[in-house]
Image (tube, grey):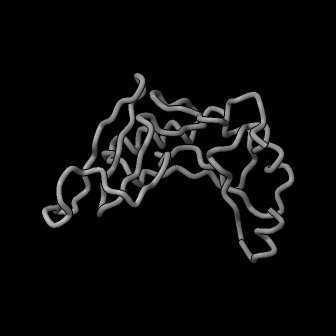
């Protein structure tokens, strides 16, 4: 975080790939205002290769969602303008532990998958009360071991 400050950053966001214990250490020793992502459809990877089975000259380049399944795990792929983003079927959410962190900002975003306005209002109402959102995952945050 000191490097971010030396580079004249004004705030930092914690990684959605980190563990709760490491996030706590980073938060306690923060030298810049911090942001904790509490809800997000996190791309598992982004690729410059297209997944569509048509020729580029025949493509309308519109966003196309593709449902995939591997070893019983569901994924969603977004093919957009000759690029691919792969998402877990469930959104990342750490709302039930977010109040442990005394961060300066909490962030929720709804950037990639389509959400109705009513669904966003419903999710935000729960997030602001640090309540659990059904059908989400917490990724590494709730692991008991540090990654680094």
Residue 75: % across, % down: 39, 36
Say whether residue 30 is left or right of residue 86.
right
- Residue 108, image x and y in percent? 52, 49
Q: Determine the residue located farthest toward the bottom in the rendered image.
A: 8
- Determine the residue positioned at 47% across, 38% down: 91
Q: Residue furthest top?
A: 72
> On the rendered image, what quadrant is the C terminus found in?
top right
Based on the displayed image, in which of its 4 quarters is residue 94 positioned?
top right
The location of residue 1, given as percent across then percent down, is 80, 62
User: Along the line of sight, which residue is nearer the eye, 96 or 14?
Assistant: 14
Number of on-image labels: 0
> Residue at (51%, 36%) from the top-left corner?
126
Q: Is residue 19 left or right of residue 42?
A: right
Q: Is residue 134 left or right of residue 138?
A: left
138 or 130: nearer the viewer: 138
Q: Nearer the viewer, residue 21 or 131?
A: 21
Residue in the picture at 66% in, 57% down = 13
Q: Which residue extends farthest right?
A: 29
Question: Left of 113 or right of it: where is 12?
Answer: right
Q: Which residue is found at the position 42% from the left and 56% from the top? A: 47
> Where's residue 117, x and y in %?
33, 48
């Amino acid at each position: 975080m000191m490097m971010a400050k030396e580079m004249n950053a004004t705030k930092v966001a914690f990684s959605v790939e980190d563990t709760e214990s490491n996030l706590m250490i980073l938060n306690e020793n923060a030298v810049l205002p911090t942001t904790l992502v509490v809800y997000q459809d996190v791309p598992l990877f982004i690729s410059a290769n297209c997944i569509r089975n048509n020729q580029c000259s025949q493509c309308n380049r519109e966003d196309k969602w593709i449902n995939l399944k591997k070893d019983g795990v569901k994924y969603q792929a977004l093919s957009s303008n000759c690029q691919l983003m792969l998402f877990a079927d469930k959104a990342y959410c750490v709302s039930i532990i977010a109040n442990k962190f005394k961060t300066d900002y909490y962030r929720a975003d709804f950037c990639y998958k389509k959400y109705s306005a009513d669904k966003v209002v419903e999710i935000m109402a729960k997030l602001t009360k640090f309540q659990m959102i059904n059908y989400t995952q917490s990724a590494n945050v709730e692991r008991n071991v540090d990654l680094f």
